[in-house]
């Protein structure tokens, strides 16, 4: 039971440490106080759940595997924790940075408590500690390379009217959508003044690595900072003989920040319903009972 409480306290310490680290992320505190507190609270909750569900079982697993390794137990146990922390790179790369940091901190907090909260300044523990730190640093540095190797990514370039502010919808897999690429190979998606655009590419679950530009009347482009763009929901509307997939974005010029990037929908209401866009594109029409949505020709 004592060992469990040690790991439980390590989970709590790790969660609080990640919270403090998050406060130093650039622009994290740039949003409204209420939104910032909400995001911060959700982050702490997710981190605590992750530590309880993943870190504690991994720690027990590590204890079992390394129980007879003697002097090599510390570095091998650290390697096991960090390796598990690296696994999210297969799903969402941004989470991998947090999970590696969480795994490293959880491991250190656990070892510190098991050592009686004492640190022995001898060369063997020092070498073991440096080796674990080196592995953690190497894991963090390797995340971008691993992401490029294992994960598919979108490469869209959104051309948005200069001065636009609010919600944007993009209909995907549209046969009549223009197909144009930028010089660096990104698929161009032009957003009109009404706040929607069409893409010939299907909507998939690839990680998003897109670019966003404000375009003025002369066609001059100005790239939009990532913190000024929030990626919203990906949805579909379907019925007999038709299905349309679409995604939602939110763009701002004066509310930029980490809070906006993660919660853009809280700043703007819905500009256009998807049915309205289908009407404008000639894919829906009124009838005696309401309206009918057609399939693409």
Image (cartoon, rainbow, N blue to C red):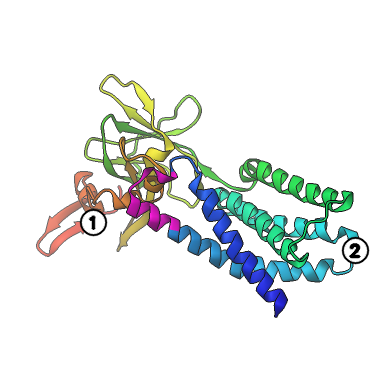
Give the x, y percent position of residue 285.
16, 53
Q: Nearer the viewer, residue 63 or 83?
A: 63
Residue bearing the label numbered 1? 293
Residue at 79% of width from left, 51% of height from top?
129
Tell me where residue 65 sits by quadrant.
Answer: bottom right
Residue at 44% of width from left, 45% of height from top?
28
Residue at 28% of width from left, 19% of height from top?
218
Q: Nearer the viewer, residue 39 or 163?
A: 39
Outermost residue, bottom side: 1
Give the x, y percent position of residue 213.
37, 30
**Residue 10 colored in magenta in the image:** no
Residue 212 vs 124, above or below: the answer is above
Which is more N-terminal, label 2 or label 1? 2
Q: Could you classify mark 1 by the number of other residues whose Cα lies within 10 Å: few (under 14), some (14-19), or many (20 or more)?
A: many
Residue 281 vs 101, above or below: the answer is above
Magenta-colored segment: predominant secondary structure: helix
Q: Could you classify mark 2 by the number of other residues whose Cα lies within 10 Å: few (under 14), some (14-19), or many (20 or more)?
A: few
Is residue 65 rendered to the left or right of residue 117?
right
Is residue 23 visible in the rendered image? The answer is yes
Is residue 13 rendered to the left or right of residue 202?
right
Give the x, y percent position of residue 250.
33, 44
**Residue 39 colored in magenta in the image:** yes
Q: CA distance from mark 1 to mark 2?
A: 69 Å
Magenta region: which residues? 28-40
Q: Nearer the viewer, residue 260 or 73?
A: 73
Residue bearing the label numbered 2? 70
Residue 65 vs 281, above or below: the answer is below
Circle 2 — which element?
helix
Q: Nearer the viewer, residue 89 or 286?
A: 89
């Amino acid at each position: 039971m004592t060992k469990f409480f040690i790991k439980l306290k390590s989970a709590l310490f790790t969660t609080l440490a990640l919270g403090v680290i998050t406060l130093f992320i650039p622009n994290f505190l740039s949003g409204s106080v209420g939104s910032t507190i909400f995001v911060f609270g959700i982050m702490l909750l997710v981190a605590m759940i992750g530590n309880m569900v993943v870190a504690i079982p991994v720690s027990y697993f590590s204890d079992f595997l390394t129980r007879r390794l003697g002097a090599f137990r510390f570095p091998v146990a650290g390697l096991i924790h960090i390796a598990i922390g690296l696994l999210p790179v297969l799903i969402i790369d941004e989470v991998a940075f947090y999970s590696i940091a969480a795994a490293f901190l959880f491991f250190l907090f656990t070892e510190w408590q098991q050592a009686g909260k004492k640190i022995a300044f001898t060369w063997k523990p020092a070498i073991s500690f440096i080796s674990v730190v080196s592995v953690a640093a190497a894991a963090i540095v390797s995340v971008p390379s691993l992401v490029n190797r294992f994960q598919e990514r979108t490469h869209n370039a959104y051309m948005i009217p200069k001065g636009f502010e609010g919600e944007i919808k993009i209909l995907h897999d549209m046969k009549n959508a223009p197909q144009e690429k930028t010089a660096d190979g990104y698929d161009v998606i032009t957003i009109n003044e009404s706040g929607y655009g069409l893409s010939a590419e299907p909507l998939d679950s690839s990680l998003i690595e897109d670019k966003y530009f404000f375009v003025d009347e002369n066609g001059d482009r100005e790239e939009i900072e990532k913190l000024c763009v929030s990626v919203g929901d990906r949805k579909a509307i379907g019925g007999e003989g038709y299905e349309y997939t679409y995604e939602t974005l939110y763009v701002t010029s004066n509310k930029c920040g980490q809070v906006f990037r993660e919660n853009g929908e809280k700043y703007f209401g819905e500009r256009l319903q998807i049915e309205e866009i289908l009407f404008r594109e000639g894919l829906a029409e009124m009838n005696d009972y309401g309206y009918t949505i057609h399939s693409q020709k």
